[in-house]
Image (cartoon, rainbow, N blue to C red):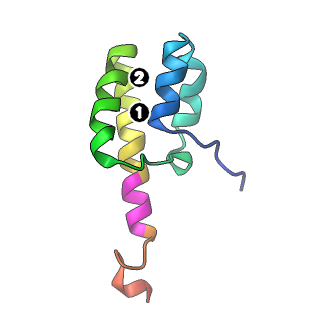
Amino acid sequence: MNEPALWSLDELIVWGSWGRLTERLPHVADPRGFVPPEDPERARDVLRSLQALTDPQSFRWVLVSCLAAILGQSARSPAANPRAS
């Protein structure tokens, strides 16, 4: 299986500021590449900025992919799945 392209919310903001966010969105479709923010509190501000840079459908795509990434990571975590031990 191919490794997913890594992407982060901060990176999407940069691409959006260049007016090229749509070029990066296909990578967002693979939540395995999501690099979560180091500061979860800052993620809220970054998401608001990202929402202002993109259309509603693309923003929903980003949100769903972030959620899938977070849920997928917790599902793979041994602490989240006691039967995996």
Which residue is depicted at the point 72% across and 51% down? 2
Q: Nearer the viewer, residue 52 or 69?
A: 52
How far from the left and from the top, in percent, is residue 4?
64, 47
Q: Which dot marks residue 62? A: 1
Above or below, 23 relative to 70: above
**Quadrant including the C terminus:** bottom left
How far from the left and from the top, in percent, is residue 6?
60, 43
Q: Could you classify mark 1 by the number of other residues whose Cα lies within 10 Å: few (under 14), some (14-19), or many (20 or more)?
A: many
Residue type at mark 2 is Ser
3 within the magenta span: no
Q: Nearer the viewer, residue 79 or 36?
A: 36
In this rendering, the count of numbered labels is: 2
Which residue is depicted at the point 52% across and 37% down? 29
71 within the magenta span: yes
- Residue 77: name its quadrant: bottom left
Judged from the image, the secondary structure of the residue bearing numbered disc 1 is: helix
- Residue 49: name its quadrant: top left
Q: What's drawn in magenta, residue-wise?
A: 70-75
Whether pointer 2 and pointer 1 mark residues with C-beta atoms closer than 8 Å, the reply is: yes
* Residue designated by label 2: 58
- Residue 74: name its quadrant: bottom left
Describe residue 47's horizontal placement relative to residue 3 as left or right. left
Residue type at mark 1 is Val
